[in-house]
Image (cartoon, grey):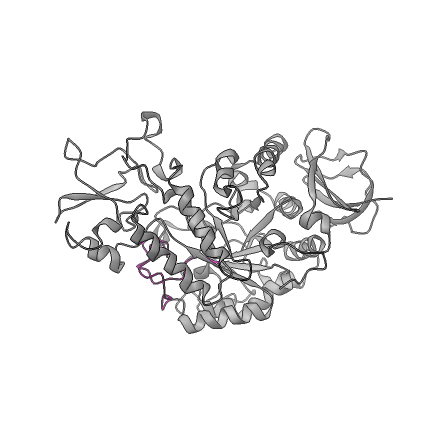
Amino acid sequence: MDRGSTEVAEPWWRSGVVYQIYPRSFCDTDGDGVGDLEGIRRHLDHLTWLGVDALWLSPVYPSPMADFGYDVADYCDIDPLFGSLDTFDALVAEAHRRDLRVILDWVPNHTSDQHAWFREARSGPDAARRDWYVWRDPGPDGGPPNNWVAAFSPSPAWTLDEASGQYYLHLFLPEQPDLNWANPDVRSAMHDTLRFWLDRGVDGFRADVVHCIGKAPALDDDPPEYVPLPHCILNDRPETHPMLRDLRRLLDGYEGDRMMVGEVVLLDPALVASYYGRGDELQLAFNFAPLHTAWDATRWRDVLTRTQAELEPIGAWPTWVLSNHDNPRHRTRYGSTARARAAAVLLLGLRGTPFLYAGEELGLEDAAVPADRVVDPGGRDGCRAPLPWDASEGHGWASLDPWLPWPPHSDRLDVASQREDPDSMLHLYRRLLAVRRGSPALVRGDQELLDLPEGVVGWRRRYRDDVRVVLVNFTAGDVAVPGVDGTVEVSSCPERRSTAAFDATLGGDEAVIVRAGP
């Protein structure tokens, strides 16, 4: 399913651009204020018009929603809030007819405490599935078995089960007990959940905190200097890697380049690189360093240099992401529309697979969420605000009062308004995606960082005789950039038109893609 004009003779996930959808916030069609699968189906044409290649759905499984779907009560069904298996199948079929791949979020580290597996495990120490989760007797002082800290709050990663007198492990909320992947029955059952969706035509998975599935058998204390940190961002265990190799073999047994991208929340590219294995573990692993990198040339050059140094020697394919459902949007982080536009050029000019987060193509900021409307235990409501489709009061939703407040300026940063404005952020993303798709250098070429004036980061992409140069000015003033000749294919600055010769000057917070040549 290749819509591109380049010579793509490699897995689709190396050449494609993935668009993340947070289903609750995409489009509501039944009037309950929560987005649904039908809302996604109705807007597939937006994705094809934009020019992306795949959509990734955050969890849509049945769930009590303690962590808004990342607490799964049944891996093999759809929560009625979003629709049904029939609705899901129709969405996949229509996406495939548009040459869009479908990636499903998969949550392997933990289930909901309402999952039938945990309910049985909790029924007593002799329960058949007791060892499907991680249970331990109290520590010598009667408290938790070790000093591990849970995510979202500085509290123990253990909860006492009063009935049995044992603690169970949860690296996240108490409502999210960790599975015991050391148990082969757990591994088999979780493999079956993947097969269920692969057999329905899903093209791949985003594996939630997949680096956490292997645990140290002794469950030793974390060193004192790490105690304030959630254990999930410290968990980097050799036991995980054979489990990933098993998952890779399962995926490789299906036709169509099925894939898995791992959420590996380790901010060192050297650690992330190990989760690719020798080409036999994850096909892709998220590189989250950009989400924590300020709009600063020195810092960005360091991120690009370190990522290339760690991944290129082992043949691993990078990923790049500026925004997602767990972090403030990059328009909010960077503080200006000009920087957000330049960041779009940066992202789509890099070697690797870009991931876009629904709404970033509109330049959305995080919503201001009043205290009485805060719902997320991790403080992530702002970046999950609903997507505005038009400038009407309901912004194209079936409800006027969605589950979270609208983001700022929804009456002009909506999809319909921006489609009418050729200089909008939406059209910038569309031009960038078209330029990328039409250039073998940008899709599959190598990447060479250039020696440029202070405040500017740039690189040359080359594939055979196709050459592009990407330049990003991280300063607020004009900067002369000598030695780069060619035609501007796209600029983040609306005043600079394409097809003009590059004049060797970048405006403040401007980024360009230059087609090299006379």
Q: Residue at x 33, y 31 (%)?
A: 228
Total labels drawn: 0
Q: Quadrant of the C terminus?
A: top right
Tell me if residue 136 is in the magenta stretch: no
Magenta segment boundaries in residue numbering: 57-81
Q: Nearer the viewer, residue 90 or 426?
A: 90
Residue 61 magenta-drawn? yes
Residue 117 position in % (x across, y down): 25, 57
426 relative to 358 in the view: left or right: right
Looking at the image, residue 308 lies above or below residue 466: above
| Image location (x, y in percent) of residue 243 | 40, 46
Quarter containing the N terminus: bottom right
Specify whether 238 is left or right of 407.
Answer: left
Question: As drawn, is 111 to the left or to the right of 461?
Answer: left
User: What is the quadrant of residue 112 in the picture?
Assistant: bottom left
Q: Residue at x 42, y 62 (%)?
A: 195
Depth check: give the residue in front, 252 or 477: 252
Q: Is residue 491 visible?
A: no
Q: Position of residue 174 (x, y in %)?
A: 26, 47
Q: Position of residue 239 (x, y in %)?
A: 37, 40
Residue 150 visible from this viewpoint: yes
Q: Quick check: 48 left or right of 105? A: right
Residue at the farthest right position? 518
Identify which residue, 167 or 130, lies in the foreground. Answer: 130
What residue is shown at x 72% (from left), y 59% (from top)?
5
The overriding secondary structure of the stretch rendered in magenta is loop
| Frontmost residue, 67 versus 17 | 17
